[in-house]
Image (cartoon, helix red, strand yellow):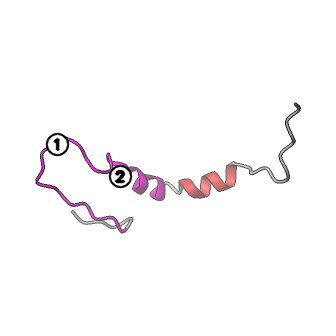
Amino acid sequence: MQQTTLPLHYAGENESTGMTALSGLPAYLDLAYVARLGASVRRHVGVREGAQPMACS
């Protein structure tokens, strides 16, 4: 299988456990990369700066 988006290499295994090692995660990483999800999160999610207030006892 040719990989063009991310440098991930898929390899089959001879064991028949019915499970995948990464549960399909690389496909979702490819989708997030192509959809520019990281740039969208940086643009739309604000990060609070400063100290967190102390809890009252």
- Say if 17 sits above or below 3 in the image: above
Residue 40 drawn above or below residue 6? above
* Magenta highlight: main SS: loop
- Residue 51: % across, % down: 85, 51
Image coordinates of residue 25 in percent, x first then y, are 37, 50
Q: Quadrant of the N terminus?
A: bottom left
Q: Is residue 12 magenta?
A: yes
Tell me, for residue 30, which label it has, or none: none
Local crowd size for mark 1, using a 10 Å CA cut-off: few (<14), some (14–19), many (≥20) = few
Q: Looking at the image, which is closer to me, 12 or 28?
A: 12
Residues in magenta? 7-34
User: In percent of the image, x 33 and y 67: which residue is there?
Assistant: 4
At 87% from the left edge and 31% from the top edge, which residue is drawn?
A: 57
Residue tagged 1: 17
Say what secondary structure mark 1 lies in: loop
> Residue 56 falls in which quadrant of the image?
top right
Residue 15 placement (x, y as % from top left): 12, 50
Q: Nearer the viewer, residue 18 or 35?
A: 18
Secondary-structure class at tag 2: helix
Which amino acid does the dot numbered 2 rest on?
Ala
Residue of label 2? 27
Question: At 39% across and 65% down in the image, what residue appears?
Answer: 6
Mark 2: few, some, or many residues within 10 Å (few <14, many ≥20)?
few
9 relative to 46 in the view: left or right:
left
Q: Which comes sooner in the sequence, label 1 or label 2? A: 1
